[in-house]
Amino acid sequence: MAIGDDGGLAVEVTRLVPASGNLTVCGQQFWLSATRAGLPVTLWADTSVVHLLIDGVRLKTVPSRLTPTHLRQLLADDGQPAGPPPITTGPVQAGAPTEVERLVNATGLISLAGRQHPVGYHFAGRRVTVRLDRGLMQITADGVLLRSLPNPLTPAEAASIRDARPAGPPPTPNPQPVRVRRRVSCRGALVIAGQRIHVGIAHAGATLTVEAADTTFRVHDGDQLLTEVPRTTVKPIARFKVRKPEPSRHKAGGQVESEYAR
């Protein structure tokens, strides 16, 4: 039998993802998404961590709530003594990349080192892996990079994170471009990540879709591509939905100022 981090048992067991996407093993729940319903998922489990894999690819690693009794029960059913873990879960070396699982709250925040940090309200309710590598904080899910942000933690804060572990391999870039919505100003421009893109006065007030790739921005009106421009900004995209327009306000001289004028 394999030896877990606590000197106890480590077990591998395969289960089918239920229709709800919420798999329960010995009372511990693992969220895998309804899109994976019916797929076999392998759990590498000891009393410290549980790694979840599909087709040999690690999806996530979560703290284990399983006891030695649970592990022996799994072995007695259809489990097998586990091989080596898919990633190292021992002590974190100073300065080495780390990762930790977190649930994004309703306002797009995660808790790290006793403080709340914004990662995007479009991830609200989603469990993600946070990877910290020197000055970079990467938000990933199932090994795919969702978003990169500056690391807000000092080395001392990073070392104090609860449930942190040595990081696995770097995440794979998302093959799909990020899509955001923007409203065109009265001057025919929109702004994304601090970069102003002119699309024309004819589109003033319209809500358009912007595909944000690594090197370009592509602006669409429905299925029609309006423009493609080089990406000159390195700022992260902080807003993904359109703000509601503010009521028009009259200025001196009878001029009207609205959100589009700013």
Image (cartoon, rainbow, N blue to C red):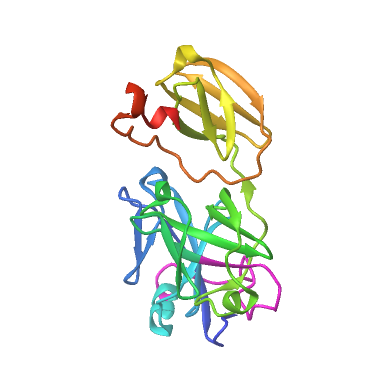
Locate residue 30: give its quadrant.
bottom left
**162 up-or-down from 254: above or below:** below
The location of residue 118, given as percent across then percent down, is 46, 57
Looking at the magenta stretch, what is its main secondary structure? loop
The residue sitting at the front extreme is: 253
Specify whether 53 is left or right of 186. right
Span colored in magenta: 76-100
The location of residue 212, given as percent across then percent down, is 58, 34
Q: Is residue 191 magenta?
A: no
Tell me what residue is drawn at x 43 percent, y 78 percent: 71
Locate residue 139: give its quadrant.
bottom right
Q: Nearer the viewer, residue 152 or 158?
A: 152
Tell me what residue is drawn at x 35 percent, y 51 percent: 21
Tell me what residue is drawn at x 70 percent, y 78 percent: 94
Specify whether 149 is left or right of 246. right
The location of residue 224, given as percent across then percent down, is 50, 14
Residue 77 in view, yes or no: yes
